[in-house]
Image (spheres, grey):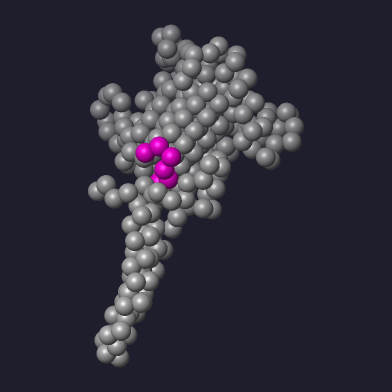
């Protein structure tokens, strides 16, 4: 994250709305419809107060911000340039969280901790990542550059660059990555693929048992393709 002036940061924070949200029609809407933008604005001020020793004042400022925006950002968190919190209600960003440049965060996202110990206990979100609505990213983990977290996923392990994580707990998948910023409709359905394979496998075994038909190689090959596709869609690191 490059060091730039406070006013340049603020200008970028407000300008990024025009790039990330096709719903905006006028500058007046920034005043009334974008709590995420205003939350980032007050965070920029509170963060400077916090780093200059005025920690209580900084916490008070962000407490007031939370009342008006519904967004809870600790003033000690590190937030880069052009970060866009879309809609924003319910977003929580913890004390030691680090959010890189050009990250997009949707409503109800939590960048939280899993430990009561001091030190780094919140996630690091690298440049260009997208965190889907309702996702929980927990612990001192890293979400890589341009990675995507599917809506309502619970992420407790690192997500590599250019990958997508979905599910509870979230698993990293190879496919479904799209260079577009959203593309949530293209996320792979891991459970559906696995159940599809299991149902067809059971049906094949039942047919073989009931009919005594042993000439099932072609169907077996089709099932194997489904299974291999499922394995390719995942990075099994358990």
User: Is residue 23 left or right of 132 when viewed as pictured?
Assistant: right
Q: Is residue 161 magenta?
A: yes
Q: Residue at x 38, y 71 (%)?
A: 222
The overriding secondary structure of the stretch rendered in magenta is loop
Q: Is residue 114 visible?
A: yes
Q: Position of residue 114 (x, y in %)?
A: 30, 36
The correct choice, above or below, for 51 with respect to 80 in the image is above
Q: Residue at x 36, y 55 (%)?
A: 232
Instruction: Between residue 12 and residue 202, name the one nearer to us.
Output: 202
Q: Position of residue 52 (x, y in %)?
A: 43, 8
User: Is residue 77 left or right of 18 when viewed as pictured?
Assistant: left
Q: Position of residue 43 (x, y in %)?
A: 51, 22
Q: Is residue 113 visible?
A: no
Q: Position of residue 192 (x, y in %)?
A: 41, 63
Residue 54 in which image quadrant: top left
User: Is residue 9 left or right of 141 when viewed as pictured?
Assistant: right
Q: Is residue 7 magenta?
A: no
The residue segment tinted magenta is 160-165
The correct choice, above or below, for 47 with respect to 208 in the image is above
Instruction: Between residue 221 and residue 71, name the one nearer to us.
Output: 221
Q: Residue at x 43, y 30 (%)?
A: 126
Residue 117 in which image quadrant: top left
């Amino acid at each position: 994250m490059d060091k730039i002036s406070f006013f340049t940061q603020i200008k970028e924070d407000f300008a990024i709305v025009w790039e990330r949200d096709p719903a905006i029609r006028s500058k007046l809407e920034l005043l009334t419809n974008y709590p995420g933008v205003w939350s980032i604005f007050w965070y920029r001020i509170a963060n400077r107060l916090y780093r200059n020793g005025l920690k209580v004042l900084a916490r008070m400022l962000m407490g007031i911000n939370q009342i008006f925006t519904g967004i809870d950002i600790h003033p000690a968190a590190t937030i880069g340039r052009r970060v866009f919190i879309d809609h924003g209600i319910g977003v929580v960003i913890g004390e030691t969280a680090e959010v890189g440049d050009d990250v997009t965060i949707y409503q109800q996202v939590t960048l939280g901790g899993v430990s009561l110990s001091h030190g780094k206990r919140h996630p690091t979100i690298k440049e260009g990542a997208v965190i889907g609505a309702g996702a929980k990213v927990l612990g001192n983990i890293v979400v890589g550059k341009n990675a995507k977290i599917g809506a309502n996923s619970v992420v407790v392990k690192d997500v590599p660059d250019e990958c997508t994580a979905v599910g509870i707990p979230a698993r990293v998948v190879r496919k479904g990555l799209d260079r577009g910023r959203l593309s949530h409709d293209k996320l792979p359905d891991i459970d559906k693929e696995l159940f599809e394979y299991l149902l067809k496998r059971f049906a094949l075994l039942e047919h073989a048992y009931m009919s005594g038909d042993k000439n099932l190689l072609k169907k077996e090959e089709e099932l194997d393709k489904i299974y291999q596709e499922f394995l390719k869609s995942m990075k099994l690191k358990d």
